[in-house]
Image (spheres, rainbow, N blue to C red):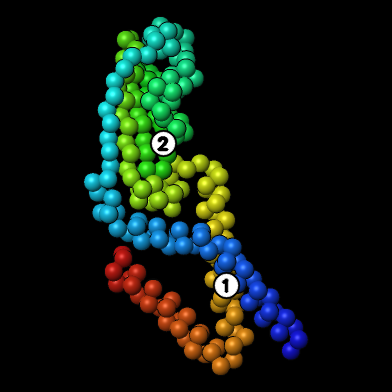
Amino acid sequence: MMVKREVASWTRWLHIYLSMFSFATLLFFAVTGVTLNHTNWIEGQQKIEQLTGELPLSWVQTNAARVDELEVVEYFRNTHNIKSRLKDFLTDDAECTVSFKGPGYSADAFVDRATGSYELTITKSGTVAILNDLHKGRDTGTTWAWLIDISAVLMIFVSLTGFLMIFFLAKKKLSGLLLTGAGAVIMVLLYFLFAR
């Protein structure tokens, strides 16, 4: 009986404090789960900017052994205020393609190696798109990917400790387990009936 009380106490303690610790994260992923389900909410928020310019030919010239990638990237960052991380820098005989990506943001430049001229397209997709990309971990980097993984583990522990607590509530155990089973069956039925 003492062990059962101790386990119940620890389960309750873990559930409460894990829930409080992860509250903001859980709320964020719940809200963005809704916004991901309604992508039409972000229509019309996208702003596209088309820019042109010219790079020093010595950075990209076709007869050079290699393209000066660092100079090109820093030029775009400084000249066009690009703060997102570099996603790709591709070079062939005629052209360089430089892509910067971030949540709700992209900047793609196409540089003519023969002339140094470029076309740059900057796309800003608005707040809801940023939140959706953060939810999915799209173009967010390793640290944010770790946050998503840690959040998922916290959600698992919060769910499991909440579920375990029903076993320590004698009067509510049967109804709690029936509700848990009903919820699982409904979710599976909805999948087979509407989501396949």
Left or right: where 103 falls relative to 148: left
Residue linked to disc 1? 160
Q: Quadrant of residue 179?
A: bottom left
Left or right: where 49 falls relative to 82: left
Quadrant location of the N terminus in the rendered image: bottom right
Residue 168 sits above or below residue 161 on the image: below
Residue linked to disc 2? 101
Spot the residue most to the left. 44
Instruction: Compare residues 112 and 81 and report the one nearer the observer.
Output: 81
Q: Quadrant of residue 78?
A: top left
Left or right: where 119 falls relative to 147: left
Query: Within 10 Å of the Cα at label 1, are there few (<14), some (14-19), or many (20+) other Cα atoms?
Result: few
Tell me the amino acid under the disc marked 1: Leu
Residue 153 sits above or below residue 101 on the image: below
Residue 146 sits above or below residue 9 on the image: above
Residue 85 visible somewhere in the drawing: yes
How many numbered marks are there?
2
Left or right: where 128 falls relative to 18: left
Tell me the amino acid under the disc marked 2: Lys
Q: Secondary structure at mark 2?
A: strand
Q: Residue at x 44, y 49 (%)?
A: 134
